[in-house]
Image (cartoon, rainbow, N blue to C red):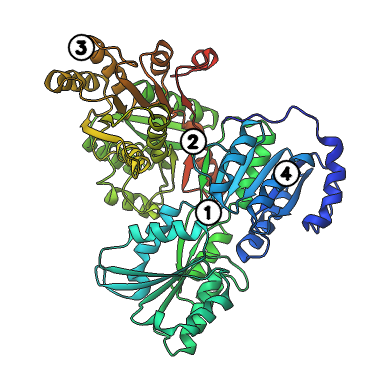
Amino acid sequence: MTGNKHGKNHMLPVICAAAALCFLAGCGRTRDTEVTRLIGVSLANQTDEWRSVLKEELQDEADQYEGVELIFLDAGDDVEKQMSDLNELVGYGAELLIVSPVDVESLIAPVEQMYYDGVPILLLDRAVKGFDYTCFFGVDDKILARKEAAALPLVTGKAPGEATTVLNIIMDNYTGRQRAQLFRNAVADNTEVRQIIVVSGTRDATEDTLLERPSLLDGVDIIITQNDYMAQGAARACDALGMGDIRIMGCDGFSGENGGIEMVREGIIDATIVCPTGGREAISYAVNYFDGMTDGPKQINLRNVLVTADNADGYVKESDDHRIMDISSVGYVQIDEDTGFRRANTDSYLSAAAEHGIMLDIVECRTVEEQFSAFERFLESDMDAIILSPIVEDGWKDLFEKARQKGVPVILSDREVNLDDDLYTAFVGADFLEEGARCMRWIEDNMQGEQDVRILELAGTRNSSPAIGRGMGFRDMMRGRSGYTIVASLVGDFSREKGYSIIKDYLDDHGRDFDVIFCHNDDMMLGAVEAIREAGLEPGSDIKLLSIDGTKDALLALQSGEANFVAECTPLLGENAMRAIEELRKGEEVPVRVISSEGTFDEDVPDTVLRNRKY
C-alpha cells in the first residue's frame, strides 16, 4: 500500500476538535476514554436510508475500539462542499478519512492529491477510477448486475430463456447509471429492459411516479429498483393500480424493522439483494492501519446475496450466527510454470501459512486435467480448505458443487472461474481490467503526438481470467478513442519462450508493422525484447513495450530503457488468503473479492524498489 501517514502530531487539537464537532456532525455519543485516533468521515448525505445505516455501522464498530473517535460531516449531495469538507476534516486533526462520495468523477483529482500528500483515504459505496486511494469497501457492481440478471427466472417464475420485460427504476446519480448499464449488459437477449429515473430515490416519489404514469407498467413482469424503499413504493403503486401480479425486487437488504429483508418476509416485495455498506470493515481496516499494517489490499468487495421468501428466515439466522471453522490443513492447487511470478507466489503462500499455523500442501499442475485431479484428491483427503489458481475459467462447476456439499471452503488465488460466487468463498488477486486499462492509459498519455498508433497484443493463456480481463480492460479504455489500432492479438501463454518465438516469427513474416507491444505479462515481454534485439531493432525505442506483473527482470528492463511501462500484479497473495482463512476460523463474514494494492512503473524505477523486490 502506498501513501504514508502524517508525521505531524495532531493529538493536541484532536480532543478539542472532537468535542467541538460532535454537535455539528451529529455524533450524539460521549466517550469515557481519551481520543487517541481521530477518523474523519465525509458522507455524500445523511438523509437517505443507506447512509443512515452506514453511519450507524461506522459508529457501532468504532465504539468497539478504545480511543477511536469519528467526526462526521454531511456534504448535502454537494460536490464542492464535500471537497471543502475533506480539507476541513484534515484541519481538525483527522489522521485518516472515510469518504462516501457525492460524485466519483468530480472527486478523482482531490482524492488523488490528498492520497499522494500522505492522507490515508478509505472509500465506501463508490470507488473513484484508478487506484489512487488507500482502500475501497463495497459491492462490485458487475457482480451485482449478474446477480440481478440471474435472479429474473427465480423471482418471476418464468423458465430460463423465456421472454421477460423489466422496468428498472434508478436514481439520477453515478451509481444508478452505472448499475443500469451493467444490468443491461448482463441480461439475456430476450429480456426487454425499460428504465425510468426517480431523482430522490424515495418510497413516496417512486409510488407517485408510477401512479401518475401507469402506462409505464404495461406488459412489465418485474420491477427492479436501486433500493428497497423505492421497491416498497413500487409495490404500493402496483397494489393501488390492481397490478399486484408484477414482481418487485429491491436492493440493499438491510435487516431489522422496515429493512428490505423484513419487507420480503412480510410479502411487501418479492426479493432483495443484500448490499453491505462496508462500514464495519472500513473501521476494522483503519484500526489495523493505525497499528502499522503496510500490506493491506486495495479493494474489499463484499458479498451480494439474493433474499426471497424461501430463504429470508434462514438468511437472518445465518447472518446472526456464522459458523466457526476449524481449519488447520489446506490444499493449494497451483500452476506449474517457470515464471518469476509463480515462484514468488508459491513462496508467499508457504511463508504466510507458516505464520498462521496452517499445514499447506501444494500440488503444481501443468494441465487443467491435472488440476481437476488434484482438487478431487484434496476433497477425498478431507482437507479443511482448498486454494486454487485455475489455469482456465471453465470446467469447475461439478468440483465446486462437491466442495460445497462437503462444507469445504474454496479460495481462488490470482485467477478466477466462470461461476457464481455462491460456489466459492473468496477471490484474492488483482483487478485484471484495471491492469489492462493502465497500459492503454500509458499509450494515450505518452504517444499522443503520433498518428495511428499500431498495437500488437501478446495475450496470455486462452480462457484464463488474466488474459480475458487484461484484454478487455485495455479495449474498454481504447474504445471511443481515435488513432489506435490493434493490428494482431497473438497467444503467448504467459511464456518467455513463446513471447520470443511469436515476435521473431511475426517480424520475419510481416516486418515492423506495429509501434507498441502490449504484453499480458513480463515473461512474454522479456522474450519479445530478445526477438526485437535479434531483428536489429532497439526495444523500448523503435518499439515500445508494455507489460503486467512487475518482476525484478522487467523492472531492470525498464531501467535499461528496453521496456517502457509495467503495471504491477503482485504475486504476494499468501497473507490476504490467510486473512480470509482467519476470518473463517473466527466465524466472520469473508469478502467475496480482495483486490491487491498495486502500482505502476516506468523508466524511473527507484533503486530501493529493485533492492527490495522479492521476485
The answer to whether residue 267 is visible is no
Q: Residues within 10 Å of mark 2 (few under 14, many from 20)?
A: many
Dot 3 crowding, Cα within 10 Å, few <14, some 14–19, many 20+: some
Which amino acid type is shown beneath numbered disc 1?
A: Arg
Three-letter residue code for mark 4: Ile
What is the x, y in percent for residue 427? 43, 43
Instruction: Calculate the distance from the C-alpha at mark 1 to the C-alpha at mark 3.
Output: 61 Å
Dots 4 and 3: beta carbons under 8 Å?
no
Mark 4, residue position: 39
* Image quarter of residue 535: top left
Mark nearer the N terminus (1 vs 2) = 1
Task: Name the mark nearer the viewer: 1 or 2.
Answer: 2
Residue named by callout 3: 535
From the viewer's perspective, is the residue at label 1 or at label 3 nearer? Answer: 3
377, 23: nearer the viewer? 23
Percent x, y for residue 114?
A: 65, 36
Q: In which quarter of the image is residue 391?
A: top left
Q: In this view, does 132 lie to the left or right of 158?
A: right
Number of residues whose C-alpha sits closer than 10 Å to that of mark 4, classed few (under 14), some (14–19) or many (20 or more):
many
The answer to which of marks 2 and 3 sits earlier in the sequence is 3
Circle 4 or circle 1, nearest the eye:
4
Mark seen at residue 596:
2
Which residue is more in the foreground, 62 or 116? Answer: 116
Q: Provide the secondary structure element on which disc 3 rests.
A: loop
- Which residue is tagged 1? 323
Frontmost of labels 2 and 3 is: 3
